[in-house]
Amino acid sequence: MSGVRVRFAPSPTGPLHIGGARSALFNWLFARKNGGTFILRIEDTDLERSSRESEENILRALRWLGLDWDEGVDVGGPHGPYRQTERLEIYRRYAAQLEQAGLAYPCYCTEEELAREREEFLSRGEMPRYGGRCRRLSPEERRRLEEEGRRPALRFAVTPGETILVRDLVRGPVPFDSTGIGDFIIMKSDGIPTYNFAVVVDDYLMGVTHVIRAEEHLSNTPRQVLLYRALGWPVPEFAHISLILGEDRAKMSKRHGATSIDQYREMGYLPEAVVNFLALLGWSPGGEQEIFTVEELVREFSLERVSKSPAVFDLNKLNWLNAHYIRHSPLERVTELALPFLQRAGLVAGEVTPEQFRWLVRLMGVVREYLTTLAEAVEHARVFFAAEVEPEDEEAREVLAWEEAGRVLAVLAEKVKGAESLDDEAAVAAVLKKLPKEAGLAPRRAYLPVRVALTGRTQGPELHLVISLLGKEKVISRLQRALAWREGHAKAN
RNA sequence: GGCCCCAUGGUCAAGUGGACUAAGACACCGCCCUUUCACGGCGGUAACGCGGGUUCGAAUCCCGCUGGGGUCACCA
């Protein structure tokens, strides 16, 4: 195992987002590629919005994607605990260290005061920034404020006029001026660390060597670099990957439709398709290959080939990949994944017996050719479960009403009645092959009415598959029902 | 608005000064395959944001502009 240590550190304030999933994936791929360690840390310092439900949801989504972690919440490890709210004493210790060293100071400003100050800056057309009011409070003033009952937050003192160079593996050196930063809070007045502080403490203590995260964190990085320096710790490597954008080229968010991994699972996307798609968003292997197994991604992945420019989420491409994986993944797996959709639609109820499952596998083998998502399996499979079918549209009714159609239907019904079973698809295909000649019809004139009689539609899978799948009983009853329909139809005319 | 990032077809993208008459993929269009539809195969439409440099030579390097995005919390 190499020295590479990376982490994914979501805050459990909602389901796993597409962007978060990609960050997790890139970290995971980087760890696996380099024989390193992948850590999962939960950043739940936002007490208001964090929840265990979200945390569990995120873990479930990561597992669904096939990502596993070597250390972290749920699996433990030598650098735990891995949930920030369980590490509070640690942050307080380092906060006290900074305060004692004179690098941080208590700030008694209330939210109202800070808001007012911000307004003043804005009204003067200046950039809102903390003015440093509490930086030079005398001990008496501090005591007075304490006596008022004010609980201070802890601010990190930033020296202005300094250039901070953030070395970034995907962007190169990025300069920042400390003047634009201002003293920022590292411990809130309730004793909870802020993101910028906790992230530094944890990344150092957990031995993180590469911080791979979304670009929105780039402008936070100089603050963190300052903290590393103040604490005397080495700065890790950074790699800020570009954002995922919606159709309107703005950062992807709820209003762009489905943005959580959960939603894609529920819509019937396969994890391998989502992983393949996400891997190609913002990274490219350089060749012409588009379909990648996870093993191939691990082998090919490198930070050097991560793109600097943001990428628009292209549902069309995800759909294409998903359709591909539905057709090419092992049929049993596809069937298992599709089963919940069939059950939810009421097509399959109760325990699935091995015999039923074998039939479902055959069914999915036929139906999957038409799907871009597993959810669509329902509409294509329905006809195979229905007790009876009706011509579904005007075109179908016309076909079934063709004058010579009755002949084929009758001939086929006789053939089927005489058959032992229809399980042998090849045998059924052979019978079908001779059907037009025996009915004295052109192929199209013969097959189309049969199709409508059996499925109610003019389009669909190859007929011998349909017939074999339906089974003797259903085929005969549908053929007879179609014949009866023709009679009713003739009288009506 | 300040700071920061980014800039090749509608989208993802290859390209790292000459092999560019700019790859591949998705989407779109056409043809073929086929008893139908879908799959598949073949082909087509479509791009280096603009302006200056540097260079014998620029999609590739530099500067400016424009455009897009991110960030400016006691949220992460």
Image (cartoon, coloured by chain):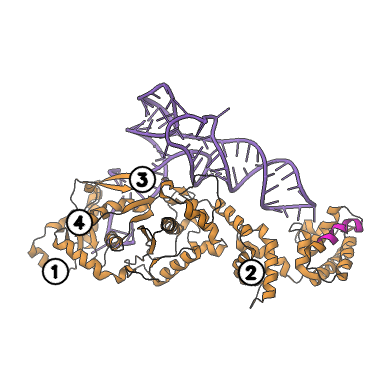
Residue A57 in percent (x, y) is at 45, 68
CA gap between label 1 and label 3 equals 45 Å
| Magenta part of the chain | A429-440
Q: Are marks 3 and 4 on the same chain?
A: yes
Please report the residue visible at 34 percent of the width from the left and 67 percent of the height from the top: A44
Q: Quadrant of the C terminus of chain A?
A: bottom right
Residue A95 in percent (x, y) is at 20, 64
CA gap between label 1 and label 4 equals 27 Å
The vertical placement of B29 against A410, above or below, is above
Residue type (three-letter) at the residue carrying disc 4: Ala
Residue type (three-letter) at the residue carrying disc 3: Arg
Residue type (three-letter) at the residue carrying disc 1: Glu
Q: Nearer the viewer, mark 1 or mark 3?
A: 3
What residue is disc 3 on? A171
Which chain's residue wears label 1?
A
* Res A230 label: 4
Mark nearer the N terminus (1 vs 3): 1
The outermost residue toward the front is: A1
Which chain's residue wears label 4?
A
Residue A98 in percent (x, y) is at 18, 61
Residue situated in front as seen by the camera: A286 or A225: A286
Q: Are marks 2 and 3 on the same chain?
A: yes
CA gap between label 2 and label 4 equals 59 Å
What residue is disc 2 on? A342
What residue is disc 1 on? A146
Q: Nearer the viewer, mark 1 or mark 4?
A: 4
Q: Are marks 2 and 4 on the same chain?
A: yes
Please report the residue visible at 17 percent of the width from the left and 68 percent of the height from the top: A150
